[in-house]
Amino acid sequence: MTEPPVQSGSPRRAAASAVAAHPVTSAVIAILVIASIFFSLYVPLYASVTPKVGDFPFFYFYLIIYMPAVGIVLWIVITLQKRLRQPAAGADPGGPGTGEVTR
Amino acid sequence: MSHVNYVTFTIVLVLFLLVTLVGFAAARWRRTESLMNLNEWGLGGRSFGTFVAWFLLGGDLYTAYTFIAVPAAVFGAGAVTGFFAVSYTIIVFPIALIFLPRLWSIARTHDYITPADFVRGRYGSRGLSLAMAFTGILALMPYIALQLVGIQAVLTVMGVGTSSTNTYVKDLPLFIAFLILAIYTYVSGLRAPALIAFVKDFLVYVMIIVAVFYIPTRIGGWSHIFAAGQAHLKAISPVTHKPNGVFIPVTGNNQLAFSTLALGSALALMVYPHSITGVLSTKRRDIIKRNMALLPIYSVMLAFVALLGYMALADKTTVANVKKAGGNAQLSVPYLFQHMFPSWFAGVAFSAIVIGALVPAAIMAIAAANLFTRNIFKEFFKPDASPRLQTKISQWTSLVVKFGALLFAVELPRTFSINLQLLGGVWILQVFPSIVFGLFTRWFHRWALLAGWLAGMIFGTIAAYKVATPTTSHWAGSTDLEFGHTVYIGLTAIILNIVVSVILTLIFKATRVPEGADETLPHQYLAEQAEAPAPAPASASAGLGTAGTAGSADDLKTELCRTGSGCPAGPANPASGDASGAMGYAARSRSGAECLSGYRLVTSPPWHGYLGTAGRTRWRWRADMASLPCSRCRAGTCSRCTTRW
């Protein structure tokens, strides 16, 4: 089976046409999800005391700010995913009566 | 024991009674004809919207143990073993967004109640499904026990409990609290924790906001708090002759430990059965996604909860109190609250922790009970159990599980149960490949996954057992050295698990070991609620790219039977009650068998089937086969068929 690499929550296989129809949107979704994981796991990026923000060492400040940021990023992702579902012109694989598959 | 502060105690008692009332009243909330159906009792009717689900999942994922243990770890050892939890609760949401919507869709389509149900349907393997159920229950027991440890910490600081040396008398309040919890969970099922979660979250938020703004003014501001934390962590411990902990992970090893702990725990959190129970109780696929974006708000709070550990270090009285109590860091937050807050507000804060323990404990007990009922009792002992009987069994199992956990918490030394919980994380991580990879691909072989699971379980357990510090000889932590790097054991174990699975899959495929039946269809992983009943046959085939076979009479018959509409008359259905009429969908094996009893399967050798091929099972397996995509495209154009048989 040729599964595309994990990239976004919803579109896959049955919706492969949706990914193909919106390559830019799909790529943006993949990048946003991967980035939100990566920038938290790559510790050297933020493991320092300075610059202090208020009284908070940068390490702690970064992680606290990161959370609402991830919330916003994921909100953008799910909004973009909704766009993926809109039937792209000519990408309807099953003709009439197959509205379910062509989300 | 010190004397009890009656103001604090009264407030905790009143709020506890309030929650009890809510718990019983929940049985009437969103009332349906009968609660005696696992979808109702165990999943709240799969009816929760974004708002309720946010509270439920928040209440589910952030347990009392979080409020006690995370700051305790920060208090004791700083960033790597404590503050990693913040990083972990961040990345859990993007990771979950990748696979949870698929799990929701497939579970809704096939009426799966537990993650092991999914594994059973996907791989057609009772053995693998049993392994999933077993791991789930095994990992949940110590987790529930730890909720009790959280309550115990609060009760200890409040001075509640008699001074008797008999543990059972001493922990009487704990017993009573748990008994009440057990009864209302029995009565109301998942609705009880869902409704109580509102109270819990409200109290927790009030507690944290007040703590974050009020405590720093009492103890000299944030700069003092961080300075005290840094000083403590830098100090050389007399026992280990090393610094107490890490304030900021600057060395490569600490950074690696930090991120592997975060990644491993994040992968584990969403495959815990109680998380999945919460997820499956939602009404629409969108709700899961929205909550993945909204729940990080909850995590912001967790960051401040973690910082309570430094606040406790900055407060001399708290440090002294903890030392007096035998250096039990678990008590640091309760002591901090007791010292900082006026007694009435300490009561509010303590109730937040106690109620914060009850919600996840209830959901975990329900999740464990569902696993037992669906994947052990129904699967192996009574395959034709009616929905009513299944619910009864689940109700009783939830009681047994709770009291098992209670004994666990009271009988075993506290440090032991904490370590068991660490081990629980390592264990539950081993079901990750079967469930999450299974959501995306059927490439893995069921027995390879089983072997990988076993390898991961054994390696993880032994590796965790071997971790030692100068103060503890075994189970001392959850990281160990791999090739000179400090790595979370769970992550090493899951890598081993995956490697074994991949290698064995290649071998099994080469030797054509039977792969088992797959009752799921690709488009079902994307189904919304409205389309959860399978769509019309033509569209399903088109989705598979087998347009050539679409529309034949046999296909139509298969589809009609799978959707439960228009089944031709057949032999007596052994379990007509099993067809979930509420969903308008009857694809589960035996109900499908009724329709398709005349369906002949061309290519299956006689030894195909489950691990055991005794009469009944084989029959069921054949029935499963008939409703599968392969049988539909016997013409041989479907790539699934050629790869699988």
Image (cartoon, rainbow, N blue to C red):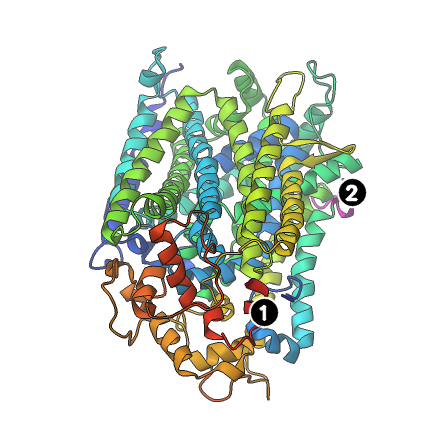
Q: Secondary structure at mark 1?
A: loop
Residue at the (65%, 28%) spot, across then down: B77
Q: Secondary structure at mark 2?
A: loop
Q: Amino acid at mark 2?
A: Thr
Q: Position of residue B488 (x, y in %)?
A: 66, 37
Q: In the shown orientation, is residue B290 left or right of residue B196?
A: right
Residue under numbered circle 1: A12
Residue at the (40%, 58%) spot, across then down: B621
Is the magenta region chiefly helix, strand or loop?
A: loop
Query: In front here: B251 or B20?
Result: B251
Count of numbered marks: 2
Q: Can residue B411 be spotted in the picture?
A: yes
Q: Dot 1, crowdedness within 10 Å: few (<14), some or many (≥20)? A: many
Q: Which residue extends farthest front?
A: B606
Q: Amino acid at mark 1?
A: Arg
Q: Position of residue B397 (x, y in %)?
A: 31, 38
As for residue A51 lying within the magenta part, the answer is: yes
Q: In the shown orientation, is residue B561 left or right of residue B422?
A: left
Q: Is residue B409 above or below residue B119?
A: above
Q: Which residue extends farthest top?
A: B165
Q: Position of residue B398 (x, y in %)?
A: 32, 39
In this rendering, do the residues under marks 2 and 1 share a single chain?
Answer: yes
Q: Which residues are magenta?
A: A43-56
Residue under numbered circle 2: A50
